[in-house]
Image (spheres, rainbow, N blue to C red):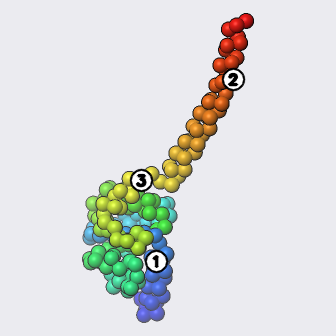
Amino acid sequence: MKRQEKEAFVSHMREELLSSSIVVAVDRTAGITVDEITRLRRDMRSADANFKVLKNTLARIAIKDSTLDPINEYLEGPTGLAYSNNPIGLAKELYKFAKENEKLKILGGVMDGKAISFNVIKELASLPSLDELHAKIIGLLTAAASKIIGTVSEPARRLAVIFASRN
């Protein structure tokens, strides 16, 4: 890659990383196959997330003097960066892949400008997705509406039973 191409790439990566609400560094030990990385990228895209493998020096330049500085400590050896504006989706896909493939280890990251550990990412992965939360809220609203209708119609039903029993 020529110097101008590298500068353009670093500038693009900086924009993408800084515009993401979560960035996670992973250690991808030797032996992980291209097919496995391709599968991870596909799974990440389905969760509105991205996964990039880039040279540590380029990553350091891209995050230099930004809220992503805590990631510098993880940029040793073969690393990759996962980033997204959907923290739960990213955490779920990354954690699921790491559980299935011991060649990938989640190191830590930054979420909304604050450093996060592996444990925080693991907790995020256990949270329900946005779609699941929407379904639960709709279910609660539907159940509440049914209870209101039952409560409002109950006095009328009782009166009907009383009048029916007197005849």
Which residue sits at x=27%, y=60%?
Answer: 102
Classify residue 108 as left or right of residue 50. Answer: left
Quadrant into which the N terminus falls: bottom left
Q: Quadrant of residue 110?
A: bottom left
Q: Quadrant of residue 14?
A: bottom left
Looking at the picture, how far across and down is residue 154, in whole percent? 64, 25
Which residue sits at x=57%, y=37%?
Answer: 143
Q: Residue 88 versus residue 51: which sits nearer the camera? A: 88
Q: Is residue 125 above or below residue 110?
A: above
User: Can I make out residue 22 in this image?
Assistant: yes
Distance between mark 2 and mark 3 Cα atoms: 43 Å
User: Are dots 1 and 3 in contact, CB under 8 Å?
Assistant: no
User: Are dots 1 and 2 in contact, CB under 8 Å?
Assistant: no
Residue flagged by tag 3: what amino acid is it? Leu
Give neighbour class at mark 3: few <14, some 14-19, many 20+ (Cα, 10 Å): some
Residue topped by disc 2:
156
Residue topped by disc 3:
127
Q: Residue 54 versus residue 32: which sits nearer the camera? A: 54
Classify residue 86 as left or right of residue 151. Answer: left
Q: Is residue 65 above or below residue 167?
A: below
Q: Residue 28 versus residue 166: which sits nearer the camera? A: 166
Mark drawn on residue 18? 1
Residue flagged by tag 2: what amino acid is it? Ala
Classify residue 60 as left or right of residue 153. Answer: left
Label 2 residue SS? helix
Which residue sits at x=66%, y=24%?
Answer: 155
Quadrant into which the C terminus falls: top right
Give neighbour class at mark 2: few <14, some 14-19, many 20+ (Cα, 10 Å): few
Distance between mark 1 and mark 2 Cα atoms: 61 Å
In this view, the mark in front (2 or 3): 2
Toward the top, the furthest residue is 167
Q: Earlier in the sequence, mark 1 or mark 3?
A: 1
